[in-house]
Image: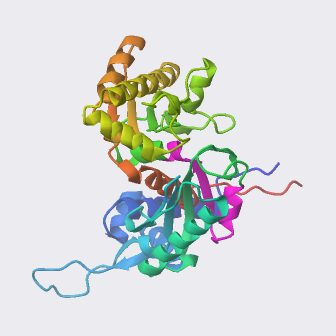
Amino acid sequence: MGRLTGGDPSLLRRINSAVVLHALRDGEPATLADLARLTGLSRPTVEGVVDGLTGTGLVTEAAPPEQPVRRQGRPARRFRFHAEAGHLLGIEIGPRRVAALLADLSGRVTGSAVREVPVSAPAEERLAQVRATVSGLLRRAGVPRGSLRAVGVGSPGIVESGGGVRLCTALPGWTGLPLGRRLRRSFRCPVLVENDANAAAVAEHWQGAGTGTDDLVFVLAGLSPGAGSLIGGRLHRGHGGAAGEIGALHLLGREAAPEEVLSTTGRPLPPLDESAVARVFERAAAGDARAREAVERFLRRLVHDVAALVLALDPERVVVGGWAAGLDGVLEPLRRELGRYCLRPPQVALSRLGEAAVATGALRLALDHVEEELFAVQAPVAAES
């Protein structure tokens, strides 16, 4: 087995490059003297590292600051992280729409696109809509496809580590689809596929109602609710990617399906018809007695499902998203029931990101991948003698 020594020059260069790149990415434009002070490296070392990073396109010279009084001599050169050197995509593939966010290497969103898709659209048509949405977004932004450094994708269903969909009841023809492999044909960069609720959990932790806590459950409420969890700041997928599938809990007790729970006629709602659900909630808000009873049954079921997950994971915060995030009545029953069942009830909040949560989380996954490539320092492995 190869042995790593402290004098390995290539490893030392990578460490120094990561340190300088961190300083530039997280701070303001800096001179070589600033960087030497911030990193503790010598001025000649910093200069060599900056030259190398400039050659890769990750660092560029910043414009000189405006001076109120013109000084003699040329101001010291300043450098900044070149966030425009590459781009990232976050894609949501949902039952009724495809959405995409375009960002630079700092994660700053520079463009977005949404395209409606019929619920009944077969897999090939839905994939074609994804490609068309991305192509239009890149064209409008003037970003060449080759500039993409990573693509994150949020999709319903149980998503395996390689990006294949093991099981999905929300999208026709999605079960068994090698989604990651299919999408990689359209991009010349890594494609990371994640369950939609997991992606939304990452988003809320990054920019939404889950900031400030590393133990979080995000509930994507709908006819087939799902949940994503972060434990200690790390996404918990489970052994086979099926963690958080609370929509299947009713099967344990052979209880009524969600389409039956929300019915006001004695006949189940059409499978996965979110528009039919919306009409029930609208009628309940207008005072319809049967619709209100149906909504109360649904909320009891949702509270029961979330309570089971909270009891198992003991999160600090529960964030409710999906279309239920727009319901005024969902928080109090959830807080009340969690207070009954839990020794230490979690905080409960509505999603701040709303419909953008899944695509935002997918974008964060792409950003995480690029950051790992930029900042991870791996020791070279020498060949065995």
Which residue of the protein is positioned furthest toward the left in this rendering? 69
Horizontal side of residue 167 vs 287, given as left or right = right
Name the residue: 69% across, 48% down.
175
Relative image position of residue 349 (x, y in whole percent) = 32, 34
Relative image position of residue 105 (x, y in whole percent) = 46, 66
Image quadrant in which the C terminus is located:
bottom right
Name the residue: 31% across, 29% down.
331
Looking at the picture, tell me which residue is in the foreground, 262 or 136.
262
Magenta segment boundaries in residue numbering: 178-199
Looking at the picture, tell me which residue is in the foreground, 92 or 381.
92
- Residue 181 on the magenta span: yes
Q: Is residue 381 visible?
A: yes
Relative image position of residue 257 (x, y in whole percent) = 55, 29
282 versus 14 height, above or below? above
Looking at the picture, tell me which residue is in the foreground, 206 or 373.
206
Name the residue: 64% across, 72% down.
188
- Residue 193 on the magenta span: yes
In the rendered image, which quarter is residue 374 located in?
Answer: bottom right
Name the residue: 33% across, 28% down.
292
Horizontal side of residue 40 vs 184, given as left or right = left
62 versus 261 height, above or below? below
Q: Is residue 371 visible?
A: no
